[in-house]
Image (cartoon, rainbow, N blue to C red):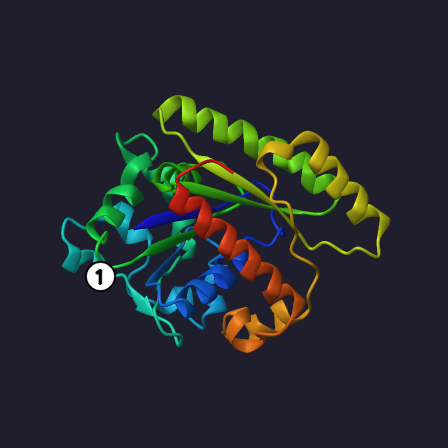
Amino acid sequence: MKVWTVANQKGGVGKTTTVAALAGLLSQNNYRVLMVDCDPHASLTAYFGYDSEALNTTLYDWFANPPESLLAARNTLLETKEKNISLIPASLSLATLDKRFSTQGGMGLTISRVLKLMSNEFDYILIDCPPVLGVLLINALAACQQLIIPVQSEFLAIKGLERMMNTLNMVIKAQHHTIGYTIVPTMFDRRTKASILALRNMRDEFASHLWSKWIPVDTKFRDASRLNQTPSKAYPLTHGVEAYQKLTEFMLELTADDKVA
């Protein structure tokens, strides 16, 4: 089981789209995929057609009543309409975690512990994160072997990347947990000077961890979410899906080689 966390402390950079796109492409390669929605806004949960507030169990229950067996952990699983893709849904109650549980010992490893119960159930775990530092983001970073940081190709998004890097370094020092990470430029529009300059700045400042390609602006991503389908199932021939295919191949090679981007 390999765990990839998709995180950035800035919203609107393509985290949920990245999780959905990677999940779809991995499943088409016959990998068993589990997506974990760690965002109280539950965008990933809604993406796949679920009303988070109508569900009996969500990720919140992992913290309130941590599962101690595989059977208990399975109770939170939801199936999607796509083969080989399952979901741990989020709910608004996740927003209360820091207030309710942050002082309890070991809370930063809750997700890691439960995922270990499922180690033989899935090949890849993809974790979608909230854009704020707290118990959920700490859990997602502690659980992962590879971190994917989507960064919108604009100046302000690059400034937000600096906060994410500070958080990553803090977690590595606190937990003595080495995390390989890859920065992925998203929403790139080669027609605009702003995108070109932003990509150039990323190459100047983060060259050693920057994916050599980019995810372009693609309106079909929005259409795929409306259909509650992964981009590769809904629109397999678009430029955006082609870019995510290249990212998937890169991440598979990276994970197989067990090295840092």
**Residue 111 place in picture, x, y as percent:** 30, 45
Relative placement, left or right, of 22 versus 212 is: left
**Residue 243 place in picture, x, y as percent:** 61, 60
State whether residue 125 is above or below residue 27. Answer: above
Quarter-wise, where is residue 14 in the image? bottom right
How many residues crowd around disc 1 within 10 Å: few (fewer than 14), some, or many (20 or more)?
some
State whether residue 218 is above or below residue 205. Answer: below
143 or 102, nearer to the observer = 143
State whether residue 159 is above or below residue 228. Answer: above
Quick one: SS at disc 1?
helix
Residue of label 1: 74
Number of residue marks: 1
At horizontal 29% and vertical 65% (from top left) the residue drawn is: 56
**Residue 237 place in picture, x, y as percent:** 61, 74
Relative placement, left or right, of 257 versus 187 is: left
The answer to whether residue 227 is visible is no
Relative placement, left or right, of 67 versus 19 is: left
Quarter-wise, where is residue 219 in the image? bottom right
Quarter-wise, where is residue 177 in the image? top left
Relative placement, left or right, of 148 versus 38 is: right
**Residue 234 place in picture, x, y as percent:** 55, 77
State whether residue 83 is above or below residue 75. Answer: below
At horizontal 35% and vertical 61% (from top left) the residue drawn is: 33
Q: Which amino acid does the dot numbered 1 rest on? A: Arg
45 or 182, nearer to the observer = 182
109 or 243, nearer to the observer = 243
The answer to whether residue 18 is visible is yes
At horizontal 62% and vertical 31% (from top left) the residue drawn is: 162
